[in-house]
Amino acid sequence: MINIIQDILKENRLDAVIVNNLYDILYLLDIKSSFNFVEASPILIITKDKNIILGDSFSLSKLTLPDWVKKKEITIKEFLDNHFSHIPTLSRFLKSSNLSTIGLFEDIPLEGVEITMLDNPIEKRLNTYTGERLERLKGAVSIVKKVLENTFPKIKEGMREIDLRNIIDALIYDIGADKRAFPTKVGFGKNTAHPSPVSNAKMLEIGDVLLIDFGIIKDGIGAEIIRSYAFKKLNSEVEKVAEVITTSMERGINFTKPGRLTSKLDEAVRNYIQENGYAENFFGISGEGLTPRKSAISISPYDRGILKPNTAFVLQPAAYIPNQFGIKIKNIIYITDTGGINLTDFYQGIDYLCSS
């Protein structure tokens, strides 16, 4: 992959290409550990004759580097004086090294250099799952499944949202994930009517809709899921909305084929929700890339991306009924040469907890 960056550098007659996204850097360095931006924030500088990773001692101490990369460590004093930013140090390094034409994949406020914005080939690679990367994705999905199945026996009437959230977070680590992909969300009853519920002390009651939303990262690969369940009692209105959302998910999966536009996939999901009277109850996009590279794909009305084989994304239809309840489902869809496969095809159905 580093050869592709070198080719981009030559084709655009650049002195250097700078990679500042952590996940792009981990991929280029073939580091499978699961870090986040707080734990490590290096910058990779690629030139025609050398490759340098610039960062503070905390970041660099976590990275096992290949021999084709040289370290440039920022002192703690310099790091603090720059308000935890590497950009001033980077600017000085470029000037002292006579690197004046710079290629960027993401905008950085650099002064005194000529900047060329580039299409990011790494992002596309990060959303490609074949061979060993596909096996790692399946392994991450298996952890999600085990977390979910170990959560069910712990769900009790009268428990608080925050307590169930903490149980899920503990299981994520106990079952073998490296870390959470994002803050876990749990909602009961009316709290599920918000697209991003914040878990609080609300107690679970019979008849509540229960939302579980979590993700994990294992060996640098993310997997995530959302499930909505009726707790012990399913009323007709909840069942009606759940049927619409479940069918919209099925339509989206059936529509998924290589070569189709992402906007048309969004349309297949969104139109069914709208046709059934919930147009004003579905907010946001129908899907996106997997954590940690969400931007790799967008299933939205105005996106002009094309679905490609051996890639994956999450499909996430929803409907939120104000002051009552919300139903949201999220599945990981993998695109083969012939269509979409639901990798998280387990523990589905709004009534799952009614018979548990």
Image (tube, helix red, strand yellow):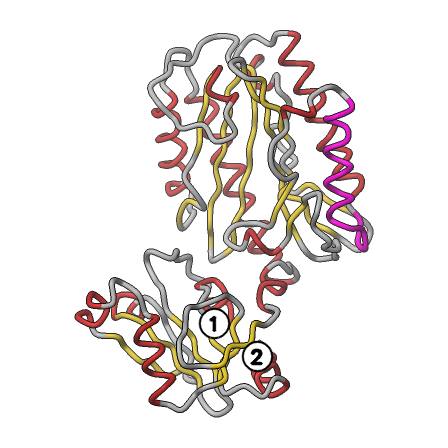
Position of residue 142 relative to residue 132, above or below, is above
Question: Mark 2 near mark 1, Cβ–Cβ under 8 Å?
Answer: yes
Name the quarter where the N terminus is drawn: bottom right
Instruction: Verify whether residue 260 appears in magenta.
Output: yes
Q: What residue is shown at x 34% (from left), y 83% (from top)?
A: 93
Q: How far apart are marks 2 and 1 (CA)?
A: 10 Å
Between residue 60 and residue 326, name the one nearer to us.
326
Crowdedness near tag 2: few (<14), some (14–19) or many (≥20) residues, C-alpha within 10 Å? many
Left or right? Give the position of 143 relative to 252.
left
Q: Does the magenta stretch include residue 317?
A: no
Give the residue displayed 80% in from the left and 51% down from the top: 260
Q: In this view, does 37 lie to the left or right of 116?
A: left
Residue at mark 2: 5
Q: Residue 19 carries which label?
A: 1
Numbered circles on residues, count:
2
Q: Quadrant of the C terminus?
A: top right
